[in-house]
Amino acid sequence: MTTTTGLRRDAQANLEKLRAAALAVFSRRGLSAPLEEIAREAGVSIGTLYNRVGSREELIDAVVDNLAGAKLKALRDRTLDETSPRAQLETFISEMINLQLSDPAMNDAMLRRYPDAVLLINACERSMALGAELVENAHDAGVLSDEFTPDDLMTVLWMAGMASHDPAAPSGWRRVVDRSISAAWTDQPNS
């Protein structure tokens, strides 16, 4: 995103309007929302958007803290508030799926639809690193099958993200995702 130091007052105001509009539109419609809609909501031309921002990915990265930061931190906190490895992993999966269902922009982020949005990808990577750590903790506690890997976790979340926003997805997708997770637990109680 264009540096903000030394900008005229009107240019700085346009940049702030673009950030606010991007946050609102991305939250409503997802990260693939038309840039023209963001410019229109900001009350500027599409040329001003490109001049001030540069690209979609730069605009995403400009609002990623407001878009995803607090949500991913809350997800992390709720997950780590749980006392057992199984409860932590269950909470992480449930919260991540609920976030993907309720927030089109977060769903796009977790599906990595914009890999050139570096700050966004970094935030997603931190979340998936937490997921991988939770899988390993559940393995160490003996409550999760050794065959269930961090890649399996990512696959389950990817399936949920894809299906949750595809009108043509079969209605039973959530049941299949839930069964995939249920089958991964060992017979030991929730510990």
Image: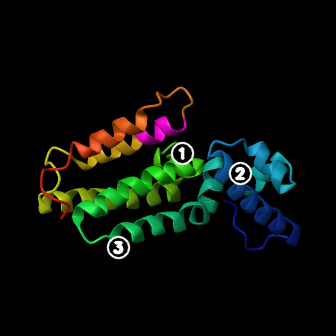
Left or right of 59, for residue 190: left
Image coords of residue 138 (percent x, y): 19, 59
Please name the amino acid that badge 3 sits on. Asp
Q: What's the residue at 18%, 65% (across, down)? A: 191
Q: What's the residue at 47%, 68% (across, down)? A: 74
Left or right of 187, for residue 70: right
Residue where numbered disc 3 is placed: 81
Residue where numbered disc 1 is placed: 114
Please name the amino acid that badge 2 sits on. Val
Image coords of residue 187 (percent x, y): 12, 51
Helix, strand or loop status at disc 2: helix
Residue where numbered disc 2 is placed: 25
Question: Which badge, 3 or 2, comes first in the chain's sequence?
Answer: 2
Q: Are marks 1 and 3 in contact (CB under 8 Å)?
A: no
Please name the amino acid that badge 1 sits on. Tyr
Q: Which residues are magenta?
A: 159-165
